Structures are given as C-alpha cells and as structure tokens.
Image (cartoon, grey):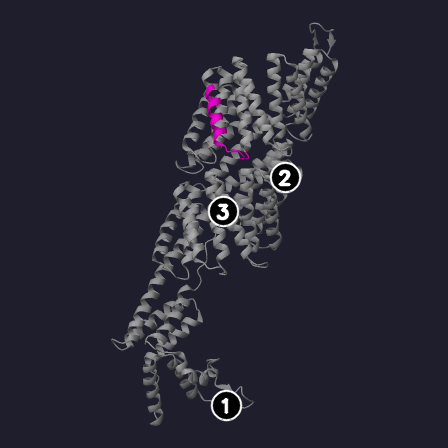
Amino acid sequence: MSEHDILPWEGLVVNMAAAEVKETVTQSMPGYHEDEDAELHMAIGMSLEKPGAETTEDTMGDNTVHIDEEEQAELDQALFLSNLPPDMCDEQLAKLHWGRVNGANSAQDPFLDLIYSAIQLLECGEPDAVSNIRGLMHQAVGLAPDGSDLKTALVENLSDIESERKIEELHSTAVQLMEHFQQSGEWTATNNAVQLMEEVVKLTPDGHTEKAGRLSNLGNAFLHQFEHLGKLRDIENAILVNQQAVDLTPDGHADKAGLLSNLGSAFQSRFECLGELGDIENAILVNQQAVDLAPDGHADKATLLSNLGTSWLNNLGSAFINQFERLGKLGDIENAIFVTQQAVDLTPDGHADKAGLLSNLGSAFQSRFECLGELGDIENAILVKQQAVDLTPAGHAHKATRLNNLGNAFSCRFKHLGDLRDMDNAILVKQQAVDLTPDGHADKAAWLNNLGNAFQSRFEWLGELGDIENAILVNQQAVDLTPDGHAHKAAWLNNLGNAFSYRFNHLGKLKDMENAILIIQQAVNLTPNGHAHKAALLTDLGSAFQNRFKRLGELGDIENAILVKQQAVYLTPDGHANKAGQLNSLSSAFQSRFEHLGDLRDIENAILVNQQAVDLTPDSHAHKAAWLNNLGNAFSRRFKHLGDLRDIENAILVNQQAVDLNLDCHAGKAELLSNLGSTFQSRYQHLGELGDIENAILLKQQAVDLTPDDHAGKAAWLNNCQKQGLRTVYHPGHTKVRQ
C-alpha cells in the first residue's frame, strides 16, 4: 500500500498574524517611510537586544553606560512608537515629552501596552499564543479611536486571523482523518477528509503561503480514495490539484521536491489503472526532478531516491519497476534497484523509513528475478523483505503489508525451485498479514486474495483438496469484502474464478467450471476498455472456455476461447511485456481446436503465433523456455498430422533449446525434459533409430528423478516412463526392439 505525504502545519496562524500586526502598526497611514525614524531606531536598538536587561554596553568603546528601569521602559516605548504612522508617532512623542517637562511619571497608554504585548506573544511562537493574542487584539480594537485608520486595520487583521484559525481547524481535522485511514483502513475517513480538504482549498486565497501544501494534501486524499474505490475521476482530480501545487511553488522552494514526488505518485497510479505509457513516463520525469532538487545530505534524499513513483517511500524505484513491467526493458529494473539501494544506504539504522525502503528494494529484486530467473535476486528479495518485517514493530500500520510482501517473495521462489518449505512459509506469513488486519480495513481483501493464491499454488503441487477448498474460501471472502465499483473487484473475481477452474481440473465437477466462467466473465464486464488489465482477464476467460471444451467437447467453447484470446492479443500493444504471453495462450487455443477438428489452418496459426511469442522474448527471460516448449508441441502435432520430417526436427530443436535454457533446479524442468523425450519418441516411431528411443527413455527418467515424491505429477511421470521403458513395441518395417 502507498504511504503518501500529508504536509505538516506548524505555527501558521502565529507567523501570519505576527506579520499582519506589524504591518498594521507600520502601514495604517499612507506615505509612511521607515527611514523617517532611523535615528530613533539606532538610538534604542541595542537596549532591546535583551528585553529584560538593566544595562546596555556602548560598543564604540570600553565604557559601559548604565540606564535605570524607567529609562529602559521609555526606550521600549520609543521603539514601538517608531513603528507608528508619523502623525500618531508625533502625538505620542509629544505626550512623552510633556510628561518629562512637567516631571510627571508617564504611565504607558493601555492601548500601546496591548499592541506591544500582542506583538511579543506572536513573536514568541508559544503554542497558546494565538488564543492569547486574540483577546488582546479584541481589547486593542476597543481602545483604538473610532473611525481611525488604525482601528479599521486592526479589525481587518483580527478578522483575517479568525478566518485562518477556522481554516486550520478544518485542515487539521482532515489530516487527522487521513492518518486514521492509514492506521485503520476505514475508507469512510478518506471521503470525509476529501470533503474537508476541498473546503480548505476553496477558503485559502490565491497567494497564500500554504496554498500549494493544501492542494497537495487534497491530491493525496483523492489518491487514497481512488486506490480504495477505483473511481477514475478521483485520480484525475489527484493529478489536477497536485499539478496546481507544483505550479504554485517556485523553483528553490524547500517543498518543491515533495510536491513533485506526490504528483509522480498520482501519475503512477493512473498508469497502473489505464496502462498509458505517457503516465509512467511523467511519473519518472517529475520524480527524477524531485531527486535532482534534493541536495546530497537532505533529510528526504533517501525517500525521494526510493520514490520516483507512488509516495515518499516508493516513488523513483517504483516508477522504474512499473515501466519495466510495461515494456520489459531491463534498464528500467536495473535503475529501480540502483536508486532504491541508494535510498537504503542513505538511511541510517533506526530511521522510521528504513523498513519501508528495504521492502521496496526487495520488490525490485523480485521483479528482476521474475524476468531473468537468477536465483541471487530472489534470495536478496527474501533477505531484505525479512529485514523489513523484523524492523517493523508489532502494531505498526504497515506490519501486515510487509508480511504480505515477504509472502509473495516466498511464493515466487517456490514456483522457481519447487521447495515446499517456501510455500509453507508463504502461507504462514500471509495468514499473519490477514490475522493482523481488522475487518473493514481497506487492505483486508487484498491480503485474503493473496493468501488464496498461495493455497492455490500449493494445491497445484500437492493436489490436496483442502488447499483448493481454502483458496476458494478466502478468495470468496476477498470478493465479498470488496464493494462494486472498487478498482480491484475484477481482479479478486478473476482469482476466485481461477480457483474454481483448478478444482474442476481436479474433481471434474462441471459446476465448478460453470462458476469459473461466470465469475471471470463478471470480472471482464467490470473492466472498462482501455484498462491495463483487460487483456489479462480476457485471456483467463478464454482459458476457462478452453478447459470446459476439453471436458465437454462443445465447439462453441473453443470458438469463444479463441475469440476472447484474440481480443486480448489485439488489446495488448506491440512492445508490451505481456504480448508474448498473450500470443502463447492464443496458440494453445488454436492447438486445442486443431486436435478436435483437424483443420490444418488452426495448427498453422498455432505455430505462427507461438513463433511470434518466442521471437518477442529474449533468451534471458524467465518464460522463454515455456514459449519454446509450446512451440515444440505445436510442431509435434503438425508432424503427427502431416508426417513431414522437418516438423519433428524443429520440435526436437526448440524443445532442446527450452531444456538448455532452464536450470536443473527449476520446478518446471521435469516437464520440459518429458516433452523433449516425447519428441524423440515420435521420431523413433517414424524412423526407428535406436538412439531416439534411448534418448526418450533417458530424458523421461531424468524427469522422474527431478520430481519430488510429494509432487502431484510424480505418479504420471513414473507411469509415462514405465510405458516407454518396459513395453515391447513392434514398429512396422523395423526390428522388434526391447525398450
């Protein structure tokens, strides 16, 4: 979850009022110039450097001139009088002079005492200064001569102070509501905060020193509301008011970098919703500007470096990650790791932001691992995310978030290595995240959804019915907790539908597949055209139709599968990181229809789009081996249909490439070896060369050996291997061979 800045309010009324009162007593008459009283200021300035002093020193020499308390009092009054308009100053000086001439003890005018006391209170900056001076100002207004310019000015300034106080009370309440939301996740707090902040901005005049900060806080409130409700107008408003805040703030202002960072957060959130490349480019641009404006050693330099994207703790690196996920350019994820590592290194141990920065660094390592499959990256991701969890005290608002993120890293390593301990750890920490989050919290549904995905992954490995039952249960809870119109409702529905699909594959109950199609269709319908996730949802819907087709053989299902998967491909622009995956999935649907109808055009299309998927994917990509494996399967199917030896040669070639690209420790290695063995077997059946069947047996034995005993597919590999290795086959035209 994002942690956006609410800019602090410190002593606004005091500072503003002090300036205005001084302006009142110095500028209530036109034509007044400070240099008219320069001599008076010079004469008394030194005596007022220490208000309670009884003596002052002559800096022109070593002689000390002693003045008594009465003289000091007169000098104090003279300083105040020097700031009055000329005619008023002259009048009061005349009174002082007349008192001296007549030997009278000149008592200070009560009005002047009040004004002088008010100025002292305002300048001292005490917490209760504002409430105290309001009373003094009211008395001063009563003592000022009726009809005088001074009285008019005092009334106007007192009105301004009262108005500012009311505005700040509204603003303070709104900030408290946002802090309450961040702690409790109670979404109604954001709605109330937005309404109050809109009123605050409306009441704050243009040119006010806090206008930009209040606009930025309103923008962040809109952003929080968008993240919870998913209404596009909220993120549009967030960008609008954050841009206004930036435009109002001159270069060189201390708050400029923070305002730019908040604007970057808003751009990134809209990118995550709509997938428009311009938004993530703008996010990186303004967050880079924020980093450049912060000098080395600046207190927020580390958080700005981490940022470039979605908040003071997530932006620069986060934006690079999002652009990487959109375009798949390795340079972006390298930049993300680089700047986030800098942020971590700049942040001392014990700093409140250290845990958040470590968690973000872990996310960057994980993203690179998902692209390249280098084990060191996921090891680093788990390491730093564990540090983030350990640094976060119990009861902290982000403890659950960091536990959830750590669980995601464990899940990711499990999918790569197949070590069941990783999945057990993933479920453990994700369950902790759920348990720490109260019902009604904005993040509760997300943690339930992720826990459901972990149960589903373990089910795929072990085939234990309890896991898929739990997956459906918690995914259903996530859906039920999420209101219609929420930005994530479609995603939670989609994951619930996929869980039903998995149970269908295990138990074969048609009701599960009916539920899967119904629910995923709802997810698609809830997602507007142009949304970044529309294509992925269409692909999952197509896969559900394809699964039902495999069970019932109804041609309408495979037609629908191909239709919606084609839509997914068309919706995914060239250059998008997911384009190859959409093409690969479409190829699978074409192959299914080919197996049913035998229409050569389908297998031709399958090979065509699968080849495109392979060509779009660099060798270093974690999914390259999977796309090559599927392309090999397509060549094998066409070979079986046409008997063209070139197809089985191509199948062996690309399946071998898939095996070579995949590490022995990868959980999917066994399947790749088994498929390569099947291609050798097919060529043996065609040519009868003993080397091919020996290779087939060897490869399938390796697949069995790589598969842990607790894996659900172990029995299938053994059965497959035994069929190939123990039976005697007579191939027409060839010698009987013991396999």
Marks 3 and 2 in Cβ contact (< 8 Å)? no
Q: What residue does disc 3 label?
A: 282
Please give left or right for residue 311 compared with residue 670 in the image: left
Q: Could you tell me residue 56's position as x and y percent?
A: 50, 86
Task: Assign a secondary structure to mark 1.
Answer: strand
**Residue 508 got which mark?**
none
> In the image, what residue type sits under mark 3?
Asn
Task: Assign a secondary structure to mark 3.
Answer: helix
Residue 571 inside the magenta-drawn segment: yes
Mark 3 or mark 2: whose residue is earlier in sequence: 3
- In which quadrant is the C terminus drawn? top right
For the residue carrying disc 1, how many other residues have a C-alpha within 10 Å: few (<14), some (14-19), or many (20+)? few
Q: Nearer the viewer, mark 3 or mark 2?
A: 3
| Picture quadrant where residue 163 is located | bottom left
Q: What residue does disc 2 label?
A: 378
For the residue carrying disc 2, how many other residues have a C-alpha within 10 Å: few (<14), some (14-19), or many (20+)? many
For the residue carrying disc 3, how many other residues have a C-alpha within 10 Å: few (<14), some (14-19), or many (20+)? many
Mark 1 or mark 3: whose residue is earlier in sequence: 1
Question: What residue span does the magenta drawing correspond to?
Answer: 559-577
